[in-house]
Structure formats: C-alpha cells, structure tokens
Amino acid sequence: MDLAFTPEEQKFADDVRTFVRANLPADVRDKVKNGKHLGRDDYMRWQQALGKKGWLVYTWPKKHGGPGFTPAERYIFENICAEEYAPGIIPFGTKMVGPVIYTFGSEEQKAKYLPAIRESTVWWCQGYSEPGSGSDLASLRTKADKEGDHYIVNGSKTWNTMGHWADWIFCLVRTDSKSKPQEGISFLLIDMKTPGITVKPIIMADGGHEVNEVFFDNVSVPAANLVGKENEGWTCAKFLLANERLGIAAVPQSKRGVEALKDIARIEQDNGRPLIENQSFAEKIADLEIQVTALEYTELRVLSAMAHGGQPGPEVSGLKIRGSEIQQRITELTMEAVGEYSAPYLPGLLWQGTNEAPVGPEYAHLAAPRYFNTRKTTIYGGSNEIQKGIISKMVLGL
Amino acid sequence: MDLSLSDEQKQLQEQAERFVRDKYAFDARRKIAATDRGWLPENWAQFAELGWLGMSLSEEDGGYGGGPIETMIVMEQFGKGLVLEPFLPTVVLGGGMIARAGTAAQKEALLAPMIEGKKQFALAWLERQSRYNLADVSLKATKEGAGWSLSGQKGVVYNAASADQIIVLARTAGSARESKGLTLFIVDGKAKGLSRRDYPTQDSLRASELTFDKVSVGADAVLGKVDEGFGVVEDGVDRAIVALCAEATGCMDAINAATLEYIKTRKQFGVPIGKFQVLQHRMVDCFTNAQEARSMTLMASLKIDDKDPVVRAKAASGAKVQIGKSGKFCGQSAVQMHGGMGVTDELSVSHYFKRLTMIDLMFGNQQHHLTRYSNLAMAA
C-alpha cells in the first residue's frame, strides 16, 4: 500500500500539467478562475485542444479511441485539470452517449458518431426527463412511432442542459406503450436541426439560462438512429447512469472550491480580523475539508479496487450523495463568508461579462447565485432520495 | 499509488478475522469481560504466537517490520469482535512509544518480553482537570539523588491493573499546561507508593485511578529526554488515535450489519420494518457514514508515518473527527432502529454503541479534534 506516485505516474502528472498550461486558452482559464460563466466557444476551444491530444475522452478504452488511462492516471488527469482551472468537460458526448454507442451501437454508428465526440466537433445534449417523469423516469411518454424506415417522435423533454448549444440530442422514447414501463423504451439519436424541434429556455433561480424544455412535433428520425434494439433502451439508460457515477463526486472541483473559500475568508473581515481567524467559521471550513478528504479517499479506494480488476463496489453509490452535499456546503459557506454583500444582483456582470462595476469585491456577486444554482446537485442525475432508494435495494437488499 | 493490501496483509486480515470468529462470539466475550482480569491470558499468548505483538515494530527493535497498516488491519477486526485484550495500551501506545523514544537498554528490557507476550503496559497521562489537553499535567516528579520521586494523581488509566510497567507523564519543570517541562517515566506497576483504585469501564474494559505517593524511580526510568516528553506523548497518542479509528470502523461495520439484519426480519404492520423508506434511508446513511470512517482511517494510517509532524497530526485529528461523527450516527441509529431491544444488555448492539461512544471521548472527542485540525490548518 503506497500513497506516493510511481515515477511513471509522476512523469504523467508533469506531462498533463505541461499540456494544460500550454493549451488551455488564457481567457478561458481566467473565466474559470474568477467563477465567470463560459460560452459554447469557451468550452469548445478547450475540448478541441484535448481532442487533438486524444485526452478528451479520457475515460474511454483504447479500442474505442480513448487513451486507456489507468485509474491512477484518471485521478491525476482530473486533479491537474481542476488545479489549473480548466473548465469541466461537458459529459453528454464524452461520458454519456459515447460509451452507450461504443457498447450498444452498430459499426456504422460507431464510425459516424465516435470521431466527432472524441474531437469535440459535435455538441450533444440529453433528453431524459419529461414534465411528468422526473424521479420516475420509466414513466416517460414521449413516443416514437415507426413509419417505414423512420420514427415519428412526439412529446417533450425537460431539464435539458445546454440544449440551446447542441447539435444532437440522445433521447429515451416510448416505442411500446402496452408492456411494462421499462420494457417499451428505446434509445434514439436525433439531429437538433430536424424540423419540428423547438427549444424553449427555462430560467433558473439565479437568473441564468442553462436548461431548456425541448418539444418534438412530428419529428421524423431515421430508424438507423436507434441505438441497440427497439424496446431495450432501458438497458442503455441504466448503463449510462452507472457509467456516470464515477467522477460525479466532483472531488477535484470541491478541493478547488474549498481553497477559493479560504481565500475569500482571508480577505473578508470580522471584528477587524480576517474571517478565517474566527474560530467558529474556521471550524466550519475544517469540517468541510475533512468531508472532502473522506470523499477523496473513498473514491481512491474505488479506483484502487478497479485497478486490480475489481468492479466498483457498493461504496461508489454513496459518492454522488456525499459529493453533491459537499458541493452545496461549499457554496453555502462561501455565501456566509461574503455576508450581506451577497445581496447585490448584477446580471450584466454575471451573465454577459460586461464591464459593469462590481459592488464590493468581484467574487461577492457570484456567491448567492452559486448557492441558489447548486441546490440542483442533490436533485439532478437521480435525486439523492432516489440514490438512497437504489443503495437500499441494490446494496443493502432491503 | 496503490491502496490495495499485499498478500501478507491479506493473510493477516484473514488471521484476525478467524481469531474473532473463533474466540469472540458475543457470549464468549461476555464471559471474558466477567473474568478478574477482563481479558484472557490464552488469547494474549495466541497474539504473541501469531506475531501480532511485534508486527508493527521494526526488525531492529525485534519486531517484524510492519507498520500502521498492519495495526489498522488487526484493530479493525478487534472492533468487529469488541476484543478486550489490551492491545492498544500495551502494543500501540506502550510498545510504540518505547520503540520511538526508548534507550537501547529500555528496548531490550521491555520490547522483547512484550513481543513474547510477557509484558503489558499502560499510559497514565490524564488527570482530573486535564480534559483533552495532554499538557495539563500536575503530577510532579522531583529530583531525588540520581533518580526521581513522583507524587500526584492520574485517572482513567486503561490496563493499569494488568500492566507490568506504567508510562507516566509527569511535570518536571514549567507551569500548569505548559508543554515544555513534561517528562515520561517508566514506572513498575507494583512500585512502592503507587496505589490503585480499579474499576470496569462502560464498554467492559478495565481502568484505574492511580495515586503516586513519593514513588521513587532511577534516572534510567526516564523515557526520552527530561522536560521534553510532550512531543513523545503527543505523537504516541496520535498513533493510538489512528489505531482506535480502525477499531471504530470495525465496530461500525458490525453494528450496521446487525441493524440491517434486524430490520430485514423484525415485522410490524405486517411487513419487515426495512420496507419502510424512512428506515431504508437512515440505513443508507449509516452505510455511507461507515464508508467515510473507513476512508479516513485509511488516509490516517497512510499518513501517520509522514515526516511532517503537522501532516501526521492533521491526519489523526481529521480521522478522529470523522470517527466521532460516524460512530455517533451509526450507534444512535442502530439503537433507534432496534427499538426497545436496542437499549437492552441482551443484544450486542448496545455494546457496540457503548464502545463507539467511549471511543469518541478517548484522546479528545469530535469537537476537540475539529478545533485542533482547524488550528493546525491555520498554522500550515
């Protein structure tokens, strides 16, 4: 048992850091560092740089064009990207639909879709939730009726993240309404330019537009876009969710978040002293740091088991729950640190990056929107209550 | 980076599992707790035979060259069985401190017999007023010829009655609560002028109140350097904390397993109570808490040999905070989910609960270590 990196791992870490420093556009780095919102082009420039290096799909095995990283390399790569203020990689192509296509797709589909995901020339989005189907995903009703060599899709999807920037959407659709809910679902790839698709923004509590409702009105989709077998889409859906669990803990991002919180607490004043010297606040940060460490070592234990050929054990199921709670706690304490200067709402500065002068320090106006927005983490990707239901059934056998 | 156990470590784990399975069924433990000593000499002899008493000491010190991971492996199984033999005070605290601070003569006289199972130790640091401050020591040692004379009180000294030697933290200089001016003495358990009041603890261990009335020791009884005992005891206690965290992890696994089994079988309203979502989610939280405890114990076991003392101290305190939090959650939840049966002596659940509760209090509770961690992080 050894915490230290091997010489090879150390060399890899140096290579990653050198690469990120040379290839991450400076303006994108600054935006991430200062907590500003990124545009489509910001993400694309970074992802395409990673794509050229072959590292964008860093979780993929070699035979599908990934780098085939060991678990330790994955850990190193994620941590260094976060430390160097690289934007998070958009997961819809790289971590969601890509692995579904290389696992369940035809050779034609692999040839058609995978290169564009690896190189980030196509932006994917997800069509899972519906207005009537949230936690009970299998109750979805968007239907796809076969007509000749096409499916005609009607219905609507919601909580569609960044769909307004997307070229393609992967959808769960109902192809059989007579059998059990899980058995009549298919996994369909749809070009967002197809006539009949309407994207309508949903404005969130922080005033931002990151999610949408997507409407399908007699949208004609080639039958060749079906992944896997008709009515067996639930298998793809479950595979995707399981594949998504690792990394969802966002440990590197949370480590970065705790450091940013400490920086703020060193600047903010409390009775003439830096807030970080206030014992009760310092202990809240200490408690948070311990939570992050526990999460990090849980993830390391999982990675280590996988490196020795094991499958992710039951401990992986708790990662999403604790990871999301910790992300929320960081934003909560950051807002607490900023205090009443969290109140000014400056949409121009927040959303358009205009030259509007901040009120108080620049970080202040971000604190409350972050806090409001991050309430989503315990809700999305299967709410934490749903996660507990899964663990209780699958792990504890209750 | 590799966090998996070696083949030898896996064997050790199986060995310890087997010991607990064979010797520590719940009824057997009850019988051991009721004996005069509160532990079984034959079990101690078996520890010696299996090499556990020397496994974490270096080969130079007559040990087998293991370290904190070996201690973690064994302590975790001890936690599962609520093992009563005084491994922590003798091997982790006493043996460890002698190995790190002792002279060649002290090591020869004490470590070899300890490894063979022929000597046991205790650490006497706490006093009535100390709470969790290791430096709050008023028991005095004054020069007496070439040696020293010790007078004062020590409290809640685990294993004092069975200990052949008691390591005593005494004030040789400085004022109350000053970390400078503390000295460790190795005192014979039967020394003249040393009297004990022995008692069982809430969790079926044995401890004593000690009174030192002009107890004379030679100059060779000093462990480490005169006036500089604080660093030795702080480091020794941090290592004991990490071992204790492993024990707590084992306790949590066992209490969670017992609770899970109970809510699957206990029926109310015509169904097993584990069918109720409110209990399912609480059970999941217990499970997650135990996972976090295991992760922090592993982290601390990997870092407790770090060359930076701040890293070591933060690792121990961070793990102790987690153990306090998780232990309380798992313990209280287990009792609650067992209903009335959870507060009876009959089931093992109350015994695990009691041990987890005492572990939180030992060497500083969750709040104490949160403050310590926070101060260490600030200083770094």
Image (spheres, coloured by chain):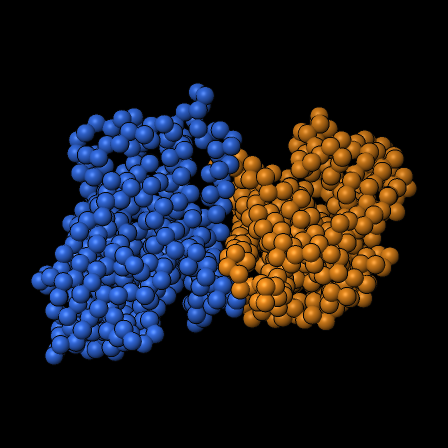
- The answer to whether A55 appears left or right of B288 in the picture is left
x%, y% of residue A237? 31, 68
Residue at the spot 37% in from the left edge and 31% down from the top edge: A338
**Colour of the chain lettered B:** orange
- The answer to whether B2 appears left or right of A43 in the picture is right
x%, y% of residue B144? 85, 32
Residue at the spot 40% in from the left edge and 32% down from the top edge: A337
Q: What residue occupies the far front of the structure in this picture?
A: B269
Residue A20 to residue B220: above or below:
below
Q: What residue occupies the far top of the structure in this picture?
A: A272
Residue A191 to residue B226: above or below:
below
Residue at the spot 24% in from the left edge and 40% down from the top edge: A207
**Colour of the chain lettered A:** blue
Q: A361 or A47, which is in the foreground?
A: A361
Q: B218 or A204, which is in the foreground?
A: A204
| Quadrant in the picture for residue A334 | top left
Q: Is residue B281 visible?
A: yes
x%, y% of residue B98? 71, 49
- The answer to whether B232 appears left or right of A123 in the picture is right
Q: B313 or B84, which is in the foreground?
A: B84
Residue at the spot 42% in from the left edge and 55% down from the top edge: A384
Q: Quadrant of the N terminus of chain B?
A: bottom left
| Quadrant in the picture for residue B350 | bottom right
x%, y% of residue B39? 80, 59
